[in-house]
Amino acid sequence: MADYYVIVTGTSRPHVKALYDELHVRLKAAGEQHRPVEGSDLGWWILLDFGDVIVHLLQPDAREYYDLDHLYGECDQLDWREIELPEIPDPVHHRRAE
């Protein structure tokens, strides 16, 4: 299991994939690595496993269908706006050439 579960809703397939790309690049630049990604080809629900932190990136229909909010409903919730985060390195140098 994990210490934290993060649920993020993107507005569309391209938005979910863009969220994944940005999160992947920024955390890689910060030295974090995740296990193999699930769902990145479809962009309906992308799962990133960082060990202690699991990140779910979902389209609105996927979030409603899987109802993770209910599944994790009894867990303590954190207000991410109140958490002091470390500076994440500029990812420009870490992006793949396209």
Image (tube, helix red, strand yellow):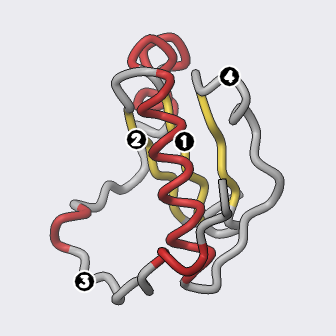
Q: Element at badge 1?
A: strand
Q: Which residue is mark 4?
A: 42
Residue at x-position 35% and y-position 88%: 86
**For the residues bearing labels 1 and 4, Cβ distance under 8 angstroms:** no
- The CA span between labels 1 and 2 is 6 Å
Instruction: Kindly identify the amino acid type of the residue bearing the numbered disc 1.
Output: His
What residue is rendered at 51% in x and 17% in y? Answer: 62
Report how far apart the C-alphas of labels 1 and 4 lie in the structure. Answer: 14 Å
From the viewer's side, name the closer residue of 46 and 71.
46
Q: Which residue is mark 1?
A: 56
Tell me the amino acid under the disc marked 2. Val
Q: Earlier in the sequence, mark 4 or mark 3?
A: 4
Q: Which residue is mark 2?
A: 8
Q: Are marks 2 and 3 in contact (CB under 8 Å)?
A: no
Secondary structure type for disc 2? strand
The residue tagged 3 is 84
81 on left or right of 92: left
In the shown orientation, is residue 8 left or right of residue 48?
A: left
Q: Are marks 1 and 2 in contact (CB under 8 Å)?
A: yes
Q: Amino acid at mark 4?
A: Leu
Circles 1 and 3: CB atoms closer than 8 Å: no
Between the residue at mark 4 and the residue at mark 3, the CA separation in whole angstroms equals: 33 Å
In this view, the mark in front (4 or 2): 4
| Labels 2 and 3: the sequence-earlier one | 2
Q: CA distance from mark 2 to mark 3?
A: 19 Å
Whether pointer 4 and pointer 3 mark residues with C-beta atoms closer than 8 Å, the reply is: no
Residue at image position (51%, 61%) is: 4
Q: Secondary structure at mark 4?
A: loop
User: Reading the chain from its start, which is encountered first: label 4 or label 2?
Assistant: 2
